[in-house]
Every structure is written in C-alpha cells, then in structure tokens.
Image (cartoon, rainbow, N blue to C red):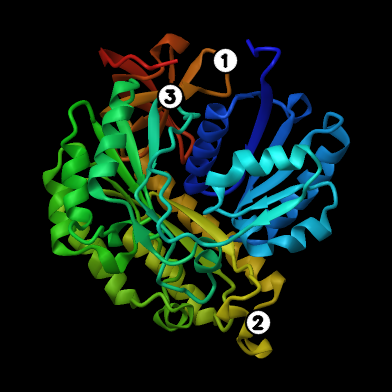
C-alpha cells in the first residue's frame, strides 16, 4: 500500500548482474528518501532505466524503450537513464532524447535523490564523473530476489580487452574491503537468504590491499548460514593456486565456474588482448577440474571478431568440444565506439552474413554437447535450491549446486527451500525432476 503523500519510482534494468545489483542500490537509496516502488512505469512519478552498453543492440533497445515510455508517462513524471549507457553517452543523451531529464553513471547514485528532486522542478542534469572511492557502503539495497543475493565486491576493470567498453563506462578496478563484504553477507543471512553471488568485472583479481580473492572466499564462505557461494565473472589469468585451493576447501563454494573464453584461437585471443593463449585457457580448466571434481563450466564466446579466419573459428568449435562446456553465452562481435577494436583495418571486418553463419554453427555445437552430457545425468539425485515459480503453472524452477536448472512440481511456499530431486528428463538445457526428499527450509523474508 503506497501512502498518499509518498512519491513513486519505477526502475527497469538491462544488462548484467552488476546492473541488477546497482538497481537494488538505487532503489534502496530512493526508498530511504521517501519513494515507494511501483511495478509499472505509467504509475511512477520517477522512471529510471538502468542501462547496459556492452553491445550496440542493448543501447538501441533502450533508445526504443525510452520512446515508448514518453507516451505512457504520467504528466510531470521524470524520466532518467542510469548505468553504463548513461556513462558512455553523458550529456549527448539529453540532446538525443528531450524527454529524458537525468543521465547518471554508475558512480553517481549517491546524488540521485537531489538530482531527481531538481528534475521534478524542471532541471535537467548529467552526472558521469568517476569516483574511485565509491562503493556505496552506507546504502541499504532493496533486493529484488529473496532467495539469493548479488553482492558487488569490485567495480571497474583494468584488463582493457580490445572489444570491451567496460573500462570506459565503469572506470579502473577497485575492490571493497573484505570486512564490508562480510558485513553485507551477514545481513543477507539475517534477511533469510543462504546463497550469495560475489560480483566483479574480473572478480578473482579482487584485492583490498590486505586480502586477495582466496581470503574473500574463505571469509564469506565461513559466514554462519551461507550454504551456497558463487562468483562472476572471473578472468582465466587470475586463478592462482591460492584461489583454487580456497574454492576446493570452502564447502559453500559451488561446483560451477563461469569462465569466459571468448575464442578458441590464440591469434584471435591476441587481437582481443585477452592475455592468455588457447593452451593457457585449457591449463586453467585442467587445474580447476583437478581440484574440484564434478565442476561445471559455462562460458562466453564471441564470433566474427575482426580478422577471425575460418581456421580461427574452427579452433573455437574444437575448443568447445574439448572443454565440454555445460552452456555458453554466444555473441556476434559488436563494435563499440572508443574501443581499440574499432580502429582495426577495415579489411579485417567480418561480414554480418559470415558472423551469423558462424554463430549458428557455434550454438549448434554448444547445444549438442550440453544435450549429450545432460542425457547422461538422468536418474541422478541432486540437491536443489527452489528459486521461483516456473512459467508453467504448478511448477517451480530450482537450481543445483553446479548451476543446472531443474523444473519440479510444487507449491510457491517451497520457494527458498532446499530439496533433493531426481532428474527425470531434459530438454537439452533444462531438466525436469521430482522431489524425493524435502530438506530443511530456510525462511525467506518478504
């Protein structure tokens, strides 16, 4: 129930888990300033679109969405753009979309209440300065997910891959203090959640000056009440022996790593400035699997990068088969203004037709491998955390420790509880299952 004297805010989020976490911070800050959340833009006094800039398609989608909102907004409502696209375009976005009043980058959320109030009085503003000390430690996030919590431990990135806009939109890498991450984790448990996901652009390069990522895993995994600990996204170069040992020794760390490969060709990886070779990636996979039996691996792969030859692409397909990924996020190369990849010779550009054909073959290869591995798992029993209602009525969506999705029958009251399930079927990527023994439930705060 919204009090009649309180203003309302609607936040729409695009992009990665870091953007979801930032939206939770934004909502928490505005809630503390007297705003209530609503679930539709037409009901809001303030509309914020939290954006992604990683690919051109994502930005075009947001531009289209802003146009849609223009005709649906309440009279005198304020429309703002936050996040990476806001950071990249800055004041240009105010010129491009006259109905947008605010443009605020990822380091500007502390000033949002004031900027919003000024916008409601007619002022338009852009805030896109980097603040290398900002971690929003005094913010209390309003979490959208009541089963697991996204906890940012690092902002920005120092790797500067030639295709990536993140260093431009999120700035240089900096890490939170370990004690603050543990404090937030403890608060999450008190809210009734038992799974956390540590977030960073290259999360396993974490260091607060005194502690590394191995220390962080042990500390967070040691918080009483944490049963599952995940992290995303790591860089293959930063899996030190200390980090891998901490993963293996910490019971809460789940048997799944999302390990971006991007290409299976050393020459393409060199042009991408990924700083590892095909063989180096395989060695990282071997070290992880030797230490953690049953480890599931997922990845990111780009096709059509400038200069990618047919042979380079075939090496990517063979790497997918050799590693045996359980799933992959696959993309055609998307040039981003300001990145070194856009300055590569025009003669190296891969046509959209060729890139699309390669993407199709890559998807087929990934799916075939996933289907074969999943068929071999039928009949096994796994512990799952029941996360939410599935799209089909009377069914729930659950997740195994190794990040496999299982659809089970059940009631909404089971959300947030653990269960043992038998895997009875698979569509190729998703399992169906039946609960064979209900495990102790952890209450989920509402």
Q: Position of residue 256 (x, y in %)?
A: 30, 46
Residue for point 85% across, 40% down: 70
The residue that label 3 is drawn on is: 146
Q: Is residue 375 above or below residue 263?
A: above
Q: Is residue 438 above or below residue 339?
A: above
Which quadrant, please, contains the N terminus? Answer: top right
Q: Position of residue 175 (x, y in %)?
A: 33, 56
- Give the number of the disc on residue 393: 1
Q: Answer yes or no: do the residues labelled 2 and 1 have beta carbons within 8 Å?
A: no
Q: Answer yes or no: do the residues labelled 3 and 1 have beta carbons within 8 Å?
A: no
- Report helix, strand or loop for mark 3: loop
- Give the number of the disc on residue 375: none
Residue 409 in view (yes/no) = yes
User: Mark 3 or mark 2, which is nearer the start of the sequence?
Assistant: 3
Using the rendered view, name the quadrant where residue 37 is placed: top right
Residue 194 in view (yes/no) = no
Using the rendered view, name the quadrant where residue 424 is placed: top left
Between 37 and 314, the one lying in front of the other is 37
The residue that label 2 is drawn on is: 349
User: Mark 1 or mark 2, which is nearer the start of the sequence?
Assistant: 2
Q: Position of residue 166 (x, y in %)?
A: 52, 64
Distance Cα–Cα, label 2 vs label 1: 47 Å
- Report helix, strand or loop for mark 1: loop
Using the rendered view, name the quadrant where residue 156 is placed: bottom left
Q: Position of residue 18 (x, y in %)?
A: 47, 48
Tag 2: Cα neighbours inside 10 Å, few (<14), some, or many (≥20)?
Answer: some
Which quadrant, please, contains the C terminus? Answer: top left
Left or right of 310? Residue 287 is left
């Amino acid at each position: 129930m919204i009090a009649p004297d309180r203003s309302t805010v609607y936040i729409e989020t695009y992009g990665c888990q870091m953007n979801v976490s930032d939206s939770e911070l934004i909502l928490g800050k505005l809630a503390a300033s007297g705003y209530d959340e609503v679930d539709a833009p037409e009901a809001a006094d303030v509309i914020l679109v939290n954006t992604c800039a990683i690919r051109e398609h994502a930005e075009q989608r947001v531009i289209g969405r802003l146009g849609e909102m223009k005709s649906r907004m309440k009279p005198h409502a304020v429309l703002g753009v936050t996040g990476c696209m806001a950071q990249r375009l800055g004041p240009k976005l105010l010129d491009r979309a006259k109905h947008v009043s605010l443009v605020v980058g990822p380091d500007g959320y502390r000033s949002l209440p004031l900027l919003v109030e000024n916008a409601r009085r007619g002022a338009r503003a852009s805030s896109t300065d980097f603040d290398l000390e900002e971690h929003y430690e005094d913010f209390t996030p309003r979490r959208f997910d009541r089963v697991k919590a996204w906890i940012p431990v690092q902002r920005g990135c120092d790797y500067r891959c030639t295709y990536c806009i993140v260093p431009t939109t999120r700035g240089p890498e900096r890490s939170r203090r370990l004690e603050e991450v543990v404090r937030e984790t403890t608060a999450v448990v008190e809210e009734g959640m038992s799974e956390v996901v540590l977030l960073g652009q290259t999360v396993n390069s974490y260091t607060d000056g005194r502690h590394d990522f191995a220390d962080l895993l042990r500390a967070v995994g040691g918080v009483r009440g944490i049963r599952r600990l995940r992290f995303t996204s790591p860089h293959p170069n930063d899996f030190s022996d200390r980090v891998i040992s901490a993963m293996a020794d910490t019971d809460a760390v789940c048997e799944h790593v999302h390990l971006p490969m991007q290409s299976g060709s050393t020459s393409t990886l060199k042009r991408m400035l990924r700083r590892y070779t095909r063989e180096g990636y395989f060695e990282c996979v071997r070290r992880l699997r030797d230490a953690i039996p049953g480890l599931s691996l997922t990845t990111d792969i780009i096709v059509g990068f400038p200069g990618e030859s047919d042979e380079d692409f075939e090496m990517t397909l063979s790497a997918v088969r050799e590693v045996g990924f359980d799933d992959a996020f696959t993309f055609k190369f998307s040039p981003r203004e300001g990145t070194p990849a856009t300055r590569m010779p025009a003669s190296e550009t891969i046509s959209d037709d060729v890139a699309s054909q390669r993407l199709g073959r890559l998807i087929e290869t990934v799916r075939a491998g996933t289907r074969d591995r999943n068929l071999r798992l039928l009949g096994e029993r796994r512990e799952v955390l029941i996360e939410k209602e599935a799209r089909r009525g009377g069914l729930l969506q659950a997740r195994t420790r190794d990040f496999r999705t299982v659809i089970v029958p059940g009631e909404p009251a089971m959300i947030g509880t653990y269960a043992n399930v038998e895997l009875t079927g698979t569509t190729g990527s998703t399992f169906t299952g039946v609960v064979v023994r209900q495990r102790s439930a952890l209450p989920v705060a509402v």
